[in-house]
């Protein structure tokens, strides 16, 4: 993730006054730090993040603890199709898709019923997932979307 993408995540979370964020693909927690910082500055909230690789998750946990933000983050280890299938907030304000690209559509389908109108979805390297782009690109599915950079697709849930 680039520094600009981290700043974008922070700004979007602040602008939407996000209180409930879901991240698919924690990796080492760089984006998680930006999102958790925004939650802190919004007055609190819950960031649920899922990572398949245990060694990456261990580093992410350490990074968030060092940043003093671990209390805002719920780390879930394993297959996101399982870890993100239960115990989610009723309303999700922001989603970051930054895991296995082929799963973007399936992860969005899990989260979609809980996306509030105006929810923001940021998908990293979405060009590797044409089915996802087709879904958010179809107005009938209730999204406005655009490529933000060569690497980032930015979408808004309309209703």
Image (cartoon, grey):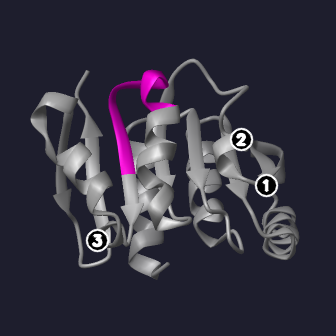
- Say which residue label 2 marks: 82
Q: Residue at x 32, y 68 (%)?
A: 152
Locate residue 52, reporting x and y percent: 74, 63
Q: Mark 1 Cα within 10 Å, few/some/many (few <14, many 20+)? A: some
Residue 83 lies, with reference to residue 117, above or below; the image says below
Q: Residue at x 44, y 41 (%)?
A: 108
User: Contact, CB < 8 Å: mark 1 with mark 3?
Assistant: no
The earlier-in-sequence mark between 3 and 2 is 2
In the rendered image, the quadrant that contains the C terminus is: top left
Locate residue 76, reporting x and y percent: 79, 49
- Say which residue label 1 marks: 78
Give me the C-alpha separation between circle 2 and circle 1: 8 Å
- Say which residue label 3 marks: 127
Q: Nearer the viewer, residue 126 or 75?
A: 126
Quadrant hosting residue 45: top right
Locate residue 48, reporting x and y percent: 68, 43
State the SS at label 3: helix
Q: Residue at x 66, y 27 (%)?
A: 88
């Amino acid at each position: 993730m680039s520094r600009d993408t981290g700043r974008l995540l922070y700004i979007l979370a602040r602008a939407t006054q996000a209180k409930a964020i879901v991240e698919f693909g924690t990796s080492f927690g760089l984006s998680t730090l930006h999102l958790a910082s925004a939650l802190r500055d919004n007055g609190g909230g819950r960031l649920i993040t899922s990572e398949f690789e245990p060694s990456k998750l261990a580093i992410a946990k350490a990074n968030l603890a060092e940043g003093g933000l671990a209390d805002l983050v719920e780390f879930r280890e394993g297959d996101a199709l399982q870890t993100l299938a239960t115990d989610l907030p009723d309303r999700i304000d922001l989603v970051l898709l930054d895991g296995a690209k082929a799963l973007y559509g399936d992860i969005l389908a899990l989260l979609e019923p809980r996306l509030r109108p105006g929810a923001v979805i940021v998908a990293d390297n979405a060009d590797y997932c044409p089915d996802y782009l087709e879904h958010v690109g179809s107005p009938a599915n209730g999204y406005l979307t655009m490529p933000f950079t060569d690497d980032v697709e930015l979408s808004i849930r309309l209703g």
